[in-house]
Image (cartoon, grey):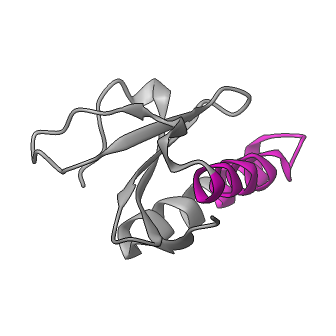
Amino acid sequence: MKYRLRVSSNAAAQIREAVRWWRSNRSAIDLLEFELQRGFDLIRNEPGVGAPASSKLAIPELRRLHLPRVRYSIYYRSAGADTIEVLAVWHTSRGSMPQL
């Protein structure tokens, strides 16, 4: 079963900012978008693939998929029987979890 993907407004803003920065500062300008799309496709097909992620907010079923080539993580959760919700896209160098 392929799940629908919903991206929160917070995550969408993080993605736009990350892509803008990446395109201005990296020679492989499409790599971040490619890796994000791969990650989104993976969690749509296998939502349990990400590691469980802890949250101060105790968000049920919160998971994190690490994208090692770009050092970003996708934070997501199940949002119903057929939907996955992306809550954040966060660079690992920040050393903390994103605000969700």
Instruction: Estimate the x, y position of residue 65 in percent, counting from the top left.
Output: 52, 37
Identify the residue shown where x is 49% and y is 36%. Answer: 50
Q: Quadrant of the N terminus?
A: bottom right
Q: Is residue 72 above or below residue 62?
A: above
Q: Residue furthest front?
A: 1
Residue at the (28%, 47%) spot, across then down? 61
Viewer-nearest residue: 23 or 15: 15
Residue 36 is covered by the magenta coloring:
yes
Quadrant location, the C terminus: bottom left
Q: Position of residue 86 (x, y in %)?
A: 44, 61
Q: Residue at x 81, y 52 (%)?
A: 34
Image-based side of 33 in relation to 48, left or right: right
Position in image of residue 80 (x %, y %): 34, 72
Part of the protein shown in magenta: 19-45
- Asked if 28 appears above or below 8 in the picture, the reply is above
Residue occupying the point 64% across, 66% down: 2
Q: Is residue 49 left or right of residue 60?
A: right
Is 5 placed above or below 51 here? Answer: below
Point out residue 51 in the picture as x, y percentages from the top left corner.
43, 30
Q: Magenta: predominant secondary structure element?
A: helix
Above or below, 57 relative to 53:
below
Left or right of 31? Residue 80 is: left
Q: Within the magenta stretch, is there residue 32?
A: yes
Where on the picture, by quarter, is residue 87? bottom left
